Each structure stands twice: as structure tokens, then as C-alpha cells.
């Protein structure tokens, strides 16, 4: 049953069919399927396929925009259920997160923020196209333990280094950890720019953030 739902979600994203994606997400909740499974096995594979086809010149920018919109509509349905799981956890750390300046990709960053929040972090999401100074201000304002910086483009990933440098210049680096992620980032990139860690996905970002806070893994169930 879940497999059919996942296939339907994948196809709805590929077709850029937001109403179908939202309706299937409702079905996910009604059937008691874990929202994260639907995201990982249905929505993300659909968007990855569209991205691949865009890269090959088989699909175009409007297709990618429609696919992203369909994914976001479905995520909006699933998000309250994910958030509800967070409600009773005590705060393990404060995170400021955003996508670097010049970059408007937000779906992965939103997922990371949502998962951190579900796992007991207080998350302050600055959105997309965030200048380095804004990360610094927000880190001060919220007394952040961790600043998370997302970048999806090879042309914007240098912005992650700029954020590390801006935190250094503001004298915050000794008490604020920096984690980076997004398709062009890697462990070696994180080391090169002086970040404290890299994760390739949202689950890994939670494990990394917990490790940096000196707490263990979330117990199953
Ligand atoms: Co864009 N785009 N896009 N795009 N887009 C990519 C990234 C691309 C790989 C597509 C391709 O060519 N195959 C390509 C980048 C190529 C490159 O630089 N090497 C690309 C391009 C070229 C562009 C434009 C330049 C296209 C144009 O205008 N000609 C343009 C740039 C706009 C800009 O930012 N200035 C553009 C625009 C767009 C849309 C607006 C249409 C849309 C974004 C809509 C939105 O976010 N609201 C879009 C989309 C949807 C994509 C693809 C298809 C999907 C991205 C996505 O949301 N994935 C993408 C192709 C692809 O990735 N396969 C592509 C799903 C999401 C769950 O995964 O974002 O990887 P992801 O996040 C993961 C991990 O990376 C990680 O965890 C997340 C969850 O598992 N992660 C972190 C992410 N951030 C993290 C932070 C962390 C830790 C982990 O710690 C802080």
C-alpha cells in the first residue's frame, strides 16, 4: 500500500501536480504512514528525477518550478504531523539556519530545519538568499549554539565560507558551531572552509547537531 502511495507522490511531483501531491499527502496521514518515509521514498525521488532531467536538458525551468511547488504543497500537509512529534521534547540546542546569499533553494534547508525541530532543537529559519551579516545578527539575537548554512549551487557555495568568516570577524566562532550542507558541499569542503561539520541529508544533520551539542542519538520510538 505504502509503495503505491510513494509511487503516486513521486509521479505527482514529476508532473508538477500540486493538488494531487497534497491529496496523496493527506492519504499518507490518513493511512498512518510515517511522513518522513513519504518524503524520502516519494517526494524526494520525484524532485531528484526532475533535477536530473533538467540537467540533461530534457525538462526546463518551469518544470522544475512546478515540481518544487508540488513538493512544497505536500510538505505543508505533512509538516504539522512532523511538528507534533517535536512538541514534547526538551530543547537540546538553538539553531539558526538559512540558505546562502544568491541562492533561493529552500526545500532541503526546510527539511533539515523541520527535522532538527522535531529532534528537540529550537530552530530559527532565516529563509533563503541570506547575507552573511544576517546569520551573524541572528546568531547573536538567538544565542545560537549552531549556525546551519545551506547552498545548492556551485556558484553560491562560497557563501558558506563567507558565513564562517563573518562569524569569526564578529568574535562568535569560539562559541557557535557551523554546519554546512546541500548538493555541492562535502566533508572536505567543510574542512576547507573551517566549518565544524557537513551532512548530506536531514537525518545526518540531526545526528551531527546532536554530536556537536555533546548529546547522544535520539532513542527509537
Ligand atoms: Co535548481 N538547481 N536552480 N531550482 N534545483 C539544482 C540544484 C541543479 C542541481 C539542477 C540541475 O542542473 N541538475 C542545478 C545546480 C547545478 C550546480 O550548481 N551544480 C540548479 C540550477 C542550475 C538552478 C538555476 C540556476 C536554474 C536557472 O535559473 N537556470 C536556478 C538558481 C536560482 C537561485 O538559487 N538563484 C534554480 C532554480 C530552482 C527552482 C526555483 C526552480 C527550484 C527551487 C525551489 C525552491 O526551493 N523553492 C529548483 C529545484 C527544485 C532544484 C532541484 C531539482 C531540486 C532541489 C531540491 O529541493 N531537492 C535541484 C536538482 C537536484 O537536487 N536533484 C536543482 C530536494 C531536497 C530535499 O534535497 O536540496 O539536496 P536538497 O537537500 C538535502 C541535502 O542536500 C541536505 O539535506 C537535504 C534533505 O535531505 N541539505 C543539508 C541541504 N541543505 C542542508 C543544510 C545542512 C545539512 C544538510 O546543514 C545546514
Image (cartoon, rainbow, N blue to C red):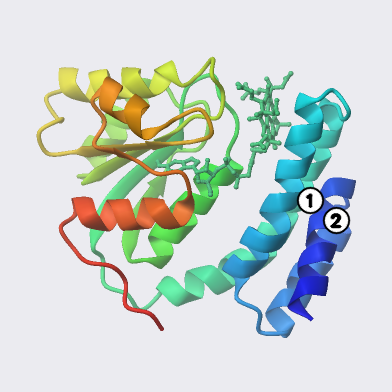
- Quarter of the C terminus within the rendering: bottom left
Residue 76 visible in the displayed image: no
Judging by the rendered image, the residue that carries numbered circle 2 is 12
Indicate yes or no: mark 1 CB to ligand 1 under 8 Å: no
Asked which quadrant contains residue 9, the reply is bottom right
Q: Nearer the viewer, residue 175 or 130?
A: 175
**Label 1 crowd bin: few (<14), some (14–19), many (20+), radius 10 Å:** many
**Residue 220 horizontal side relative to residue 4, left or right:** left
**Label 2 crowd bin: few (<14), some (14–19), many (20+), radius 10 Å:** many
> Percent from the top left, x then y, of residue 101?
48, 21
Residue at figure coordinates x 29%, y 39% from the top left = 197
**Residue 193 horizontal side relative to residue 15, left or right:** left
- Quarter of the N terminus within the rendering: bottom right
> Percent from the top left, x then y, of residue 137?
28, 30
Q: Nearer the viewer, residue 158 or 131?
A: 158
> Percent from the top left, x then y, of residue 37?
61, 68
Measure how far apart labels 1 and 2 are at the Cα level.
Answer: 7 Å
Amino acid at each position: 500500500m505504502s509503495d503505491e502511495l510513494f509511487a503516486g507522490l513521486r509521479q505527482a511531483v514529476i508532473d508538477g501536480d500540486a493538488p494531487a501531491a497534497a491529496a496523496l499527502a493527506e492519504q499518507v496521514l490518513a493511512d498512518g504512514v510515517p511522513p518522513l518515509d513519504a518524503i524520502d521514498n516519494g517526494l524526494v525521488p520525484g524532485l531528484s528525477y526532475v533535477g536530473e532531467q533538467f540537467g540533461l536538458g530534457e525538462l526546463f525551468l518551469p518544470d522544475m518550478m512546478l515540481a518544487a511547488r508540488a513538493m512544497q504543497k505536500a510538505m505543508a500537509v505533512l509538516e504539522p504531523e512532523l511538528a507534533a512529534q517535536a512538541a514534547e521534547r526538551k530543547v537540546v540546542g538553538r539553531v539558526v539556519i538559512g540558505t546562502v546569499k544568491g541562492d533561493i533553494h529552500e526545500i532541503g534547508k526546510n527539511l533539515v530545519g523541520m527535522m532538527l525541530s522535531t529532534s528537540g532543537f529550537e530552530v530559527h529559519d532565516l529563509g533563503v538568499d541570506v547575507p552573511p551579516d544576517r546569520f551573524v545578527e541572528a546568531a547573536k539575537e538567538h544565542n545560537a549554539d549552531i549556525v546551519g548554512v545551506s547552498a545548492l549551487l556551485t556558484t553560491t557555495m562560497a557563501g558558506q565560507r563567507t558565513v564562517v568568516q563573518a562569524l569569526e570577524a564578529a568574535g562568535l566562532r569560539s562559541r557557535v558551531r557551523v554546519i554546512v550542507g546541500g548538493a555541492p558541499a562535502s566533508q572536505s569542503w567543510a574542512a576547507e572552509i573551517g566549518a565544524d561539520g557537513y551532512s548530506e541529508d536531514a537525518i545526518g544533520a540531526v545526528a551531527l547537531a546532536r554530536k556537536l551539542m555533546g548529546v547522544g542519538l535520539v532513542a527509537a520510538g
